Amino acid sequence: MIFRAVIYARCSTEEESQKDALKKQVEEGKASVREMGWTLAGLYVESRSGTTTKGRSEYNRLYEDLTGDKFDVIVIKSQDRLMRNTKDWYLFIDRLLTEQKRLYIYIERKFYSSDDALITGIKAILAEEYSRELSKKINNAHHNRQKQNGSAVLTSNTYGYRKMPDKSIVIEEEEARIKRRMYELCAAGFGSRKISSILKSEGIVGRNGKPFTDSAILRMIHNPLNKGTVVMNRLHYDFETKKVMRIPKEEQYVYENKVPPIVSKELWEAANQEIAKRAEGINQSGDKKRGRYRGKSRISGKLFCGLCGNPYYRRTRRRYKDRAVICEWKCKRYLETGRNTGRTRGLQLREVQSEEAEGCDNVHLDEETLYQLLEQICGKRYMPDKERMISDMVHMLKIVLKEKDYRQEIDRKRRQEEKLSGQMDALVEKLLEGIVSDEAYQRTQRELEERLENIRDEIKELERQNAKRSENVLKERIAHIEKTLQTAGMIEKAVAAEMLEDVDKIWIYPEYMEIVFNFPEAAERKNTDIPTQEYVDRIKIEYGNLFDYRKKKEEERNAIVRIMQENPRVTAREIAEQLQISLSGANYRIGILKSEGKVKFNGSGGKGEWEILTHD
């Protein structure tokens, strides 16, 4: 029998600096395969060292392939090439023996056998201890270098900078120009999401050819490196926990003017002060709250992706058919990087987020459907009288609208006008102080002037409407409001809002959601005497394919196939009536089934029968 062999090669920490060490190891492995008369079935070449298997894609691929039928023998140079971790070694050997594969160590010219379990276990322990001591030495060397104001260590991903062969740091001027633009926009009052949109509209992208995400922009603006300040000893790799630990600020080393600055200290401070202002709000009791952005919606800051752990953001679009505004909630990771490009769908990462995963495949949530779903849940909990609520609201509107006119809205627009004028004055001051460049000033000034002109036009229109206001207009307005309350789901949103006051988080998954309540806080807020232990603190709501557009369409087409199976002479009009869709919609879905080769109509002139070709 001729064995199918694969080679796993990885440089040790000591060999990484040696030229062509990895290439030489692969050649040695190939020579061993030829010498044994085996067939080379593949290569697993790792360019990354490490004591554990985390982050080693080729090892993890090899580990997964052990369960298949791709090879019979794994060829390695030595035991420590696989790992220097005792636990991982035993897991690997257990799978190797279970799947009846063999391990050949060519430096010893022998196969691993179960008789070697003790000695290889000892070797794994020794290798792990060696790595532990090596880690201590490396960490100590880094700490001494940082304490003694050694050279700055920049990765190749540091945007705006480049490290020269002599270890000096120089500015990449083209990238630095983009960074300065970020700082200027931020100092002018724009948030990171707005800055991201502006850069995207100007065709500015990162090194990977993709637009800058709002989180990436925030990280850059916060980084003191851009004003020439290097902060060392911020992080520490702990060998025992295999985690990177954050060092307290008082133990960090801060060196100013360590690298060439991309922006001035004044501009850096101005931009970061703007971020601090935006992150700080005042609640009704006067206490300052930081962090979570509540937004204009009751569910802002509450929706989180169960697949990747990121928050959901609200987005609007116009429907192509009738230009109606559609509100949807989408995962932040999807908005930044699109759909998943490699990770298996369904992996739940809400506890430990994966930094390497790109994109997210979770569902988008139609806001109207979401509120209807929440209304069904809280309807059982609060049991509202919808008709009575609408009647009371219309009665109050009749009283309020008779007493008030458009002055309240005009006053609100006036305040917006004053605020924009203040921003324009502040912008002039920043220009005079040298914080904002002439180019940034002119661009921002034009944007503010356009917004100011729009508000003044709106004020004129409101004043015109106020002048011609009449009792008939008032009646029509109340009737319109009453109709909107009945049909537009306003009551459903109000009822759901009552429950959302008690909700801490809502975890979204493709086919269900988990609502997590914070009843101790709710009980304190509402001064209720009901014991919190009587509440259920978490409920699961199954919604199947309700938010999965592709699966819903697939189900519709499968329903058409079933109808055709039951009645081969069925017409498109009859299908439309059964599914309660339009005739054009039915014909469109039938057309897709035909193009996919699933159905065929045998006949002509509307007479004949449907034939089902394939149906899963």
Image (cartoon, helix red, strand yellow):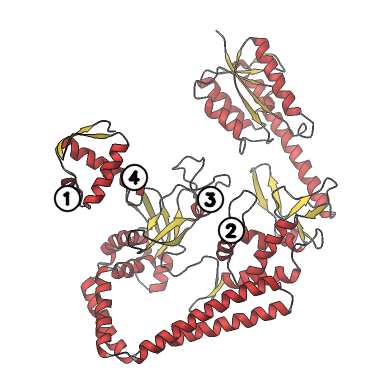
Q: Mark 2 points at which residue?
A: 215
Question: Based on the displayed image, in which of its 4 quarters is residue 520 positioned?
Answer: bottom left
Badge 3 or badge 1: first in the primary sequence: 3
Foreground pick, 176 / 47: 176
Q: Which of 298 and 470 is in front in this view?
A: 470
- Mark 1 packing: few (<14 Cα in 10 Å), some, or many (20+)? few
- Mark 1 vs mark 4: in front: 1
The residue pinned by badge 3 equals 337
Relative to 394, residue 271 above or below: above
Q: Pointer 4: what residue?
A: 551
Q: In this view, does 600 lie above or below 498?
A: above
Please say whether residue 223 is visible from this viewpoint.
Answer: no
Q: Is residue 366 above or below residue 244?
A: below
Type of the residue with mark 3: Thr
Residue at the location (15% across, 46% down)? 574
**Residue 577, which numbered label?**
1
Residue at 63% from the left image edge and 68% from the top image edge: 186
Q: What element carries label 2?
A: helix
Give me the C-alpha separation between circle 1 and circle 2.
Answer: 49 Å
Q: Position of residue 220 (x, y in %)?
A: 66, 59
Q: Is residue 584 shown left or right of residue 201?
A: left
| Measured Cα–Cα span from mark 3 to mark 2 | 12 Å
Label 2 vs label 4: CA separation?
A: 32 Å
Q: Is residue 121 left or right of residue 231?
A: left
Q: Quadrant of residue 516?
A: bottom left
Question: Mark 2 or mark 1, which is nearer the start of the sequence?
Answer: 2
Instruction: Determine the residue positioned at 57% across, 77% down.
Output: 448
